[in-house]
Amino acid sequence: MWKTTEGSTARLIQLCVGYFFFYVITGISVKYFTGSSLLGYPGMEEIQYLVYSTIGGNLIALSVVLVLRWYHLHSNKIITWGKLKFPQEILYIIPSGICTAVVIPTTTLMYLLPISVMVAMVIMRASVIIISRIVDAIQIRQGILKKSVYVEENIAVLFALFAAAINIFYVGPGDFDFVHSPAAVIILGSYIVAYSIRIYIMNYYKNTRANGVKLDNNGFFAIEQIAASVVMFGAGYILFNSSTWFETTNEQLVIFRDSIALPHPDWWFAIIAGTAFGMVAFFSVFIFMFKGRTATFAGLVNRLTSLVAGTGATLVSYFLFQGTFPKTQDWVSLVFILIAVAFLSRAEKKRTRELTIAKEI
């Protein structure tokens, strides 16, 4: 077991390795399960796989937080309403959980668009990097964040923007026109709005710990996941019954209902594969809330790790499952990402020196 200390670079690397590993599995699984049955793949409808993978991801996350009792949150203040007592942080962690309930399905839906895993990841990750920088600017102005954003972090954000621009606006012959696809724009828009609120809340929680109060990321994750699961279960119940309640014959709603009422023969396998996405959630939150780092830095580390994982997933899909080989613009985007990583490395060295002097790590 590689033992590391909280807030150290070594601990950060550990989280990135775990994130990378499970995201590669997640990216490959999407393309595998929705591959053509004529080629020997399960041939699931996109909505079917979304249902099964979401169930698998939720089950693994809930199982861990309930069995280990992570929901006992270290709080700045306990609120009393009559006989009810609870941490004040719950009042904003629950809304973060609601946003998570939006992020989870929209992430999978992005992968199901007719684009490579790499392109989907570049678009989503670059969006979150930009959001993280904006959150830092807001919280610095509010006096919540006491640390400055290094020049190296800002330069890394710039290269991440270059990476996103290439894949969003470059449309070659036969490529998927992302900008002019209403479905793609709605999915991405929902993802961005939900993540904007969620990243602000996560950093508000991290940056407002009172003296002597532990930065309880496990507790935050537990409450957020419980709230997200309740919301997704409620939404799923409504969608399952909507065709009956509203007498609709919408094709997507029918597929959603049938995925549960008349499950695909490989439904159990898809649920197991979906647990990889649940594991990704742990590493994702812990990187976003990593001790002593700005939202800009943590967001960059989180998103760039998943982007590199996307490269691996795309290549594996190509060689094993006849997927799409990365195009030239994909590789150019990856170069920009690697340049961003180089600047992040310099920023991390400066930050660890700063935290060591301040005796925060």
Image (cartoon, rainbow, N blue to C red):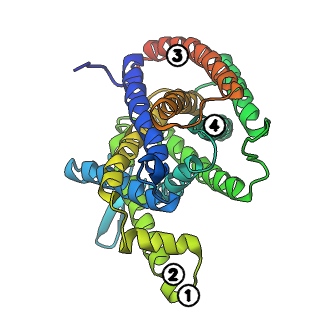
Residue drawn 34% across the image and 54% down it:
271
Q: Which numbered circle lies on residue 246?
A: 1
Query: Which of disc 2 and disc 3 is earlier in sequence?
Result: 2
Q: Examine the rendering and report whether any part of residue 154 can be seen.
A: yes
Query: Residue tagged by mark 2?
Result: 242
Q: Amino acid at mark 2?
A: Ser
* Cβ atoms at labels 3 and 4 below 8 Å apart: no
* Cβ atoms at labels 3 and 1 below 8 Å apart: no
* Cβ atoms at labels 2 and 1 below 8 Å apart: yes
Query: Residue tagged by mark 4?
Result: 119
Position of residue 266 measured from the top left corner of the image (x, y, whole percent): 33, 57
Q: Nearer the viewer, mark 3 or mark 1?
A: 1
Query: Which of disc 4 and disc 1 is earlier in sequence?
Result: 4
Q: Which numbered circle lies on residue 348?
A: 3
Q: CA distance from mark 3 to mark 4?
A: 27 Å
What is the crowding at mark 1: few (fewer than 14 residues within 10 Å), some, or many (at least 20)? Answer: few
Left or right relative to 350: residue 154: right
What is the crowding at mark 4: few (fewer than 14 residues within 10 Å), some, or many (at least 20)? Answer: many
Determine the secondary structure under disc 2. helix
Quarter the N terminus occupies: top left
Query: Which of disc 1 and disc 3 is earlier in sequence?
Result: 1
Position of residue 83 measured from the top left corner of the image (x, y, whole percent): 28, 72
Q: CA distance from mark 2 to mark 1?
A: 6 Å
- Compared with 80, 37 (above or below) is above
What is the crowding at mark 2: few (fewer than 14 residues within 10 Å), some, or many (at least 20)? Answer: some
Q: Examine the rendering and report whether any part of residue 140 can be seen.
A: no
Q: Amino acid at mark 3?
A: Glu
Query: Which of disc 4 and disc 3 is earlier in sequence?
Result: 4
User: How many callouts does the rendering have?
Assistant: 4
Q: CA distance from mark 3 to mark 2?
A: 50 Å
